[in-house]
Image (tube, coloured by chain):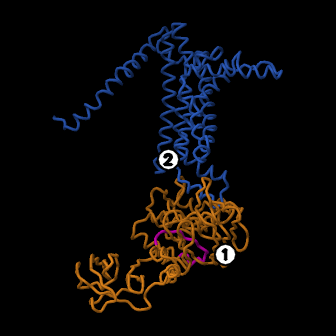
Chain colours: A orange, B blue
Amino acid sequence: MRADATTIELNRCGKTFADGTRALEPLDLTVAAGETVVLLGPSGCGKTTLLRLIAGLEAPDAGGRVRFNGEDVTGLPIERRAVGMVFQSYALFPNMSVRENIAYGLRVRKLDKGEIAARTREMLEMMQIGQLAERRVHQLSGGQRQRVALARAIAVRPRVLLLDEPLAALDAVLRDRLRVEIDALLRRLAITAVYVTHDQAEAMMLGDRIVVMSAGQVEQAGTPREIYRNPATPFVADFVGTVSRIATAAGVVLLRPEDIRLCEVAAGRAAATVETLHFLGGRCQVGLIGGDGARLIADAPPDTPLKPGARVGIAWDDAAPLRLPLMEAAQ
Amino acid sequence: MRLSRDAHRLILLALPVSVFALAFFLVPLARLAIVAGQGPKGIAAYASIVTEPRHFESMLVTLGLALAVTLTALGLATVAGLFLSRHQFPGRQLAIAVLTLPLAFPGVVVGFLVIMLGGRQGLIGAITQALGGGKVVFAYSLAGLFVGYLYFSIPRVILTVMASAEKLDPALEEAARSLGASPLRVLKDVTLPGLAPGLTAAGAICFATAMGAFGTAFSLAANIDVLPMTIYTEFTLNANIAAAASLSLVLGAVTWSALFLARSLAGAPAAAAV
């Protein structure tokens, strides 16, 4: 829709609230034009505050700067930043129909009637909600509401699209479907997008890059593959995917479930006892207790003959263990 | 035919309130309706609200006063209520306590306060006299009644606005702003529609209270005959019991209609907003 996508630049953006709480340590972040960046972290990690700084709903602490395509927008309130926002609570206007909700931003911008009607219709078609146009918001399901909210946000052709846990209130099946739709939408619009979530699967699927946050700081920023295979900190290793810690003579080894091979005890580099077995369809998730009492998670084929209580050996390729720069420095 | 146990229990539970309503509400009301028609003018007593100039004027003054008080209270309290619910500051609890203080006073005391402010020995009169502008006295006029009624109307509306505002999803206003709406536009398109059910209900209570308020009028009213005062005068001084009864019923009908109208107005959007 826009060939001229916007670059977002944050410089030394921190946020301290009036009561003295430090929500965000000063940080730098650049989101390239047309890129989708996912802010991932547990609740209270500062990801929503960061999104609100970009939106203009919060002002950064003194010294912080927000730039869109080089233009300093730090002093601009949200209504003058031309950002599209999508909220977890949908935030649709209950006193308006679906059509009126989508047209609201266009009406505020005082476009002429024909243009408003045409663009509203285009949005209704794009989000496949044409048949809902005259409904009131309270007559819609959660998935329909979020489609309307997306349509309303992109109808005004914003410079950047900001999404704050848009799928968190939906049930699992709907969440998967809408995630695919949002991914397709973001690719099609080629709009710069920042997406906040605490769900790592959502982050991996949607993000060109993921920014993992914890306690108001960026733990790591990188592609989903980098974050998963080369986590920079123990926090990232644990938060994005599952990790097992196995004590060996050479030190602690960190392994992803798919990298652990279960074998005869004699053939293994370490040994463990099977505690739980969960059949997940394409694979079995095996819970084990290692020699030092640590809990391990490994993947096994779906038809594995293992039973709880069995003693197994644990093997892995030399290239498999995760290497954490900070952890190696500490050892 | 045997009633089910549930029906028996329901009747049993409804009995106390039914007896109460019958004894203290329906019976006296019916008696009032009969008394009103048994005066020298008969059924025509009901028409006195339009035929008797004194009653008609009293009705107009009361309606106008109640409307003015309601609209002013809604305006002032919406601003204050929104501010209080949106901002955290030292002394906020104290501010709320002070603003809702009038709830603790009966109408007579409110009237007394107005006299202290704008009466013949009042504070404002003393100040204007000291400034050389002559003594300003407003307590015993319509302005005094207005101030008094406003004083005890504001707390109810503020509390309702605060409760309604806290239930509004803050993301609604943020969404409107992200779409380019100015703060005033957000107020008009999002905040006020969101508060509308609460404001309608609070306004109706406010109007009903102002229509029937007696204590304040009694302690102030030297020149003004609001409807409750007229009823009192007809009843005690003129011993015109039929007129008093008919006016009472008219007052009740107007007030009840306002409450009923507000409930049906507020009901629809309130249900839709869920």
Residue located beneath label 2 in the image? B269
Chain letter of mark 1 equals A
For the residue pair B63 and A44, the one nearer the viewer reads as A44
Residue located beneath label 1 in the image? A7
Chain letter of mark 2 equals B
Residue at 39 percent of width and 19 percent of height: B30
Residue B19 screen position, x and y as percent: 31, 24
Say which quarter of the image contains residue A103. bottom right
Determine the secondary structure under disc 2. helix
Q: Is residue A228 above or below residue B233?
A: below
For the residue pair B90 and B164, the one nearer the viewer reads as B90
Residue A118 screen position, x and y as percent: 61, 68
Labels in figure, total: 2
**A250 horizontally vs A37: left or right:** left
**A249 horizontally vs B102: left or right:** left
Mark 1 closeness class: few <14, some 14–19, many ≥20 residues within 10 Å: many
Asked whether disc 2 touches disc 1, contact meaning CB atoms under 8 Å apart, the reply is no
Q: Tell me if residue A201 can be seen.
A: no
Quarter the N terminus of chain B occupies: top left
Say which quarter of the image contains residue A209. bottom right
For the residue pair B70 and A260, the one nearer the viewer reads as A260
Q: CA distance from mark 2 to mark 1?
A: 42 Å
Farthest-out residue, right: B132
* Between marks 2 and 1 in the image, the one whose residue lies nearer the viewer: 1
Magenta-drawn segment: A185-199
Q: Is residue A190 magenta?
A: yes
Question: Which residue type does callout 1 highlight?
Answer: Thr
Question: Which residue type does callout 2 highlight?
Answer: Pro
Q: Is residue A39 above or below residue A94?
A: below
Instruction: Mark 2 vs mark 1: tell me if same chain.
Output: no
Residue at 59 percent of width and 34 percent of height: B99
